Image (cartoon, rainbow, N blue to C red):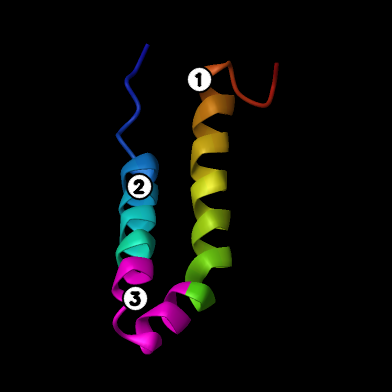
Amino acid sequence: MEQQPKTYKREVAMGMLLWLAGMAMWGIWEPEAKQAAEYFTLPIFTFVGGAFAMDAVFKQGGFGK
């Protein structure tokens, strides 16, 4: 069986969550950072959910099961 190349979906998703948390913390002192964090919340959580869901599905045998 051939080994598939690593896609780094989960790593990118975790980086995005850390960035969002950092912006939320920075928003304590800078209101613009809090606004940016609020603006990016939905796209980031959508990507994170998709990345982890796809990982779980493919580890369980894929969509063709």
- Examine the structure image and report whether residue 26 is included in the region drawn in magenta: yes
- Disc nearest the viewer among 3 and 1: 3
Q: Position of residue 64 (x, y in %)?
A: 69, 22
Instruction: Return the mark for residue 28.
Output: 3
Residue at horizontal 36%, vertical 77%? 27
As shown in the figure, which amino acid type bears the numbered disc 2? Met
As shown in the figure, which amino acid type bears the numbered disc 3? Ile
Q: Are marks 3 and 2 in contact (CB under 8 Å)?
A: no
Q: Which residue is mark 2?
A: 14
Vertical order, 12 against 42 (above or below):
above
Instruction: Return the mark for residue 59.
Output: 1
Image quadrant in which the N terminus is located: top left
Q: Position of residue 24 (x, y in %)?
A: 38, 68
- Disc nearest the viewer among 3 and 2: 3
Instruction: Label 3: state its secondary structure.
Output: loop
Q: Dot 3: few (<14), some (14–19), or many (≥20) neighbours within 10 Å? A: few
- Examine the structure image and report whether residue 38 is included in the region drawn in magenta: no
- Name the chief secondary structure element in magenta: helix
Q: Position of residue 11 (x, y in %)?
A: 31, 43
Q: Looking at the picture, tell me which residue is in the foreground, 8 or 46.
A: 46
Instruction: Label 2: state its secondary structure.
Output: helix
- Left or right side of 6 for 54: right
Q: Looking at the picture, tell me which residue is in the foreground, 57 or 52.
A: 52
Q: Which segment did they paint magenta?
A: 23-37
Q: CA separation, marks 3 and 1?
A: 39 Å
Which tag, 3 or 2, sits closer to the chain's start? 2
**Residue, far bottom:** 32
